[in-house]
Image (cartoon, rainbow, N blue to C red):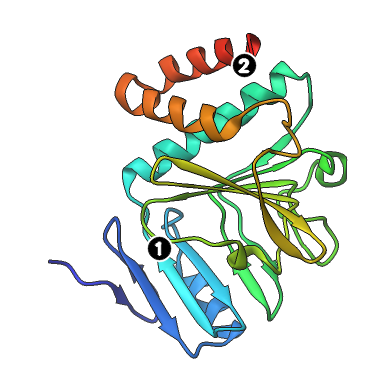
Amino acid sequence: MTLPTITENSISLCAGDELILRFRTWQDYETLLSHREDKAGLRIRYNATTQEIRILSPLPRHGKEANLLADFVKALLRYEEKDWQAFTPITLKRIDRQGIEPDYCFYLENRDRILGKERIDLEIDPPPDLAIEVDLTCISSPEDYQVISPQELWIYRQEELSIYQFEEREYRESQTSRWFPKFDLKTLIPKYCDRGWKMGSSVALREFEKAIAFS
């Protein structure tokens, strides 16, 4: 068994590992981000309230499901003839308060405000309109995004999609998406994620596009 290691200049975790560092500062978090180097697959989170840094090394299936969910979102946007700007990977930070790296995020309503930008600075830029998390390696919660506050958050865990809306300074679970209210995504997304695992992503995406066209 290979143990997680952090040295002055590097971070090493095996796929599926999660490492929690307690009683850490914002500067500790920034230092770890700078030491990640080319290991872009590692996800690093910080919460000033708990003073915890969480370092995650996703499993291969994690990326596959995250990409498939993003493809479904893009299919919905194409169907509704809406424009978007998507980011992955991305680090979203509120300085001294919270840092997180969603699997995917989309700018929809606020797309025009971030066009041409390589980095998002939440001191001057709006948060994403939609953030997506796939939970295989760790457990995500709306509280992880409370300070960042994307308008809508999807968490996909154990073949179930949870949808959260940011309202009155907190997340509230919803049965529908504010961006795609006419679709039963809590049924469609798990069904076609399962198809993607069994039949392949391209097959699942084609079937998903047909399903939304006739819904």
Compared to residue 185, the image places residue 155 above or below, namely: below
Residue lying furthest left: 1
Name the residue type under label 1: Leu
Tell me the residue at 61%/69% (across/down): 99
User: Callout 2 environment at 10 Å: few (<14), some (14 to 19), or many (20+)?
Assistant: some
Tell me the residue at 73%/31% (across/down): 181
Q: Which residue is mark 2?
A: 212
Residue lying furthest front: 175
Tell me the residue at 75%/46% (across/down): 129
Cα distance, mark 1 to mark 2?
Answer: 34 Å
User: Callout 1 environment at 10 Å: few (<14), some (14 to 19), or many (20+)?
Assistant: many
Image-based side of 70 in relation to 127, left or right: left
Q: Nearer the viewer, residue 85 or 177?
A: 177
- Percent x, y of residue 203: 42, 15
Residue 6 disc label:
none
Find residue 46 and report its image quarter: bottom right
Compared to residue 109, the image places residue 35 above or below, namely: below
- Percent x, y of residue 15: 29, 55
Q: Which residue is mark 1?
A: 56
Of callouts 1 and 2, the N-terminal one: 1
Name the residue type under label 2: Ile
Compared to residue 178, the image places residue 40 above or below, namely: below
The secondary element bearing badge 2 is classed as: helix
